[in-house]
Image: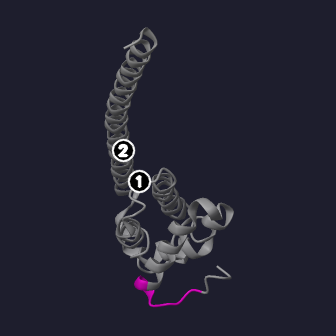
Amino acid sequence: MELIEIAQLVTGVATLLVATVLIWQMIIQKRTLDIAHNDADSNVSLMAMDTRSRTNEWFAENCTPEMADKLDKGLDTFTEKEKLVINTYWRNTMRVLSTEWRLGRLTDQRWYYKNTFKNEGMLHLKAFRDVYNSNALGRDLSKQYASAYSGMRDLGIEAYEEVTGEVIDRENN
């Protein structure tokens, strides 16, 4: 074997070793990134639940017995202060929900978003359905940001239709 062949063999082995080390480093980096992603997702989930809990606590503190009696009668039975409480609760709940959607949290879990619309003080009571229908905090939210929130908007409409039995014209709403 000549010197050039030995040099080529050594170079080939060295290249193979370097490639192996680089592949191993990529595997380690992928694992690290997966752990970081899981930690970030857990943190977002915890923050969303904490914010939602605080919003619910705030609403419970600000919802008087008289106001609670009016929730299924509709928004027009409320005083201006009570309307402010209802709208603030709605905005805060929608803010958390839309942020979760934008961050991609559970976007493959349609039930999560529909359940929040239907049961988390969003659409199961007439006053909240009135808020949903009356302003940009409901269906119109997604018109402004159609590409980012269209899927969430559709889930909100589906939830509204399931709760009320009404069919919404999606082209004009």
Q: Where does label 2 land, which residue?
A: 41
The C terminus: image quadrant:
bottom right
Tag 2 and tag 1, C-beta contact below 8 Å: yes
Q: Which mark is residue 105?
A: 1
**Region of the chain picked out in magenta, as a range:** 162-168
| Mark 2 neighbour class, 10 Å CA radius: few under 14, some 14 to 19, many 20 or more | some
Left or right of residue 81, residue 57 in this image: left
Q: Residue 160 or 58: which is nearer the viewer?
A: 160
| Residue 77 percent coordinates (x, y) | 51, 76
> Relative to 160, does residue 35 appear above or below in the rendering?
above
Q: What is the secondary structure assignment of the residue under circle 1?
A: loop
| Residue 131 percent coordinates (x, y) | 54, 71
Q: What is the secondary structure assignment of the residue under circle 2?
A: helix
> Relative to 17, does residue 54 appear above or below in the rendering?
below
| Mark 1 neighbour class, 10 Å CA radius: few under 14, some 14 to 19, many 20 or more | some
The answer to whether any part of residue 40 appears in the image is yes
